[in-house]
Amino acid sequence: MTSYRPPDFNERAELSRQARQKALDKLRAKAAPSEAELAERKAARLEREAEEAKQRTERAAAAKAAKEEAARAAKAKALADEAAATSAKSDAVKSEAERKAERDARYAARKNRK
């Protein structure tokens, strides 16, 4: 019984050439698509591309609307914050007469303690 002998370079190259040729023969044996089938594929591709374009425009419009809504909300929030700050500031700033009255009350209370 003979022992195993690994294939040399020439044998591997020949096996590779045969495999390539077999694949080419199989590809050539395959029937070419008919004109009707090609037209059907093209129509399906065009329909798919039109649908994708429509979806892209819808997504872009939705993104634009969301961006505008976010800007509107940010502007409204800024106006509300500004109004709150203004009202808080006006509450914090007392008139001169109110401050004088509080000061006089403190002085009177201190005088009464003595």
Image (tube, rainbow, N blue to C red):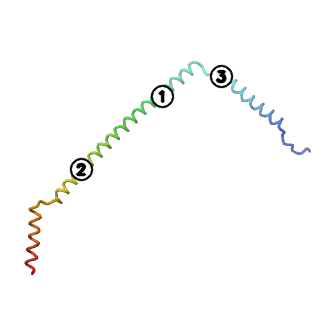
Mark 1 secondary-structure assignment = helix
- Residue type marked 3: Ala
**Quadrant in the picture for the N terminus:** top right
Separation of disc 1 and disc 3 at Cα?
Answer: 27 Å
Determine the image quadrant of residue 107: bottom left
Would you call the spot at circle 3 few (<14 residues within 10 Å), some (14-19), or many (20 or more)?
few
- Above-or-below relation of 67 to 36: below
Q: Please provide percent x and percent y for residue 41.
A: 54, 24
Would you call the spot at circle 1 few (<14 residues within 10 Å), some (14-19), or many (20 or more)?
few
- Residue type marked 1: Glu
- Residue type marked 2: Ala
Determine the image quadrant of residue 6: top right
Q: Nearer the viewer, mark 2 or mark 1?
A: 2
Q: Please provide percent x and percent y for residue 99.
A: 12, 64
Front residue of 96/80: it is: 96
**Numbered tag placed on residue 31 in the rendering:** 3
Q: Which residue is mark 2?
A: 80
Of the image marks 2 and 1, the number of the one nearer the N terminus? 1
Q: CB of mark 2 within 8 Å of CB of mark 3?
A: no
Front residue of 1/99: it is: 99
Separation of disc 2 and disc 1 at Cα?
Answer: 46 Å
Q: Which residue is mark 1?
A: 49
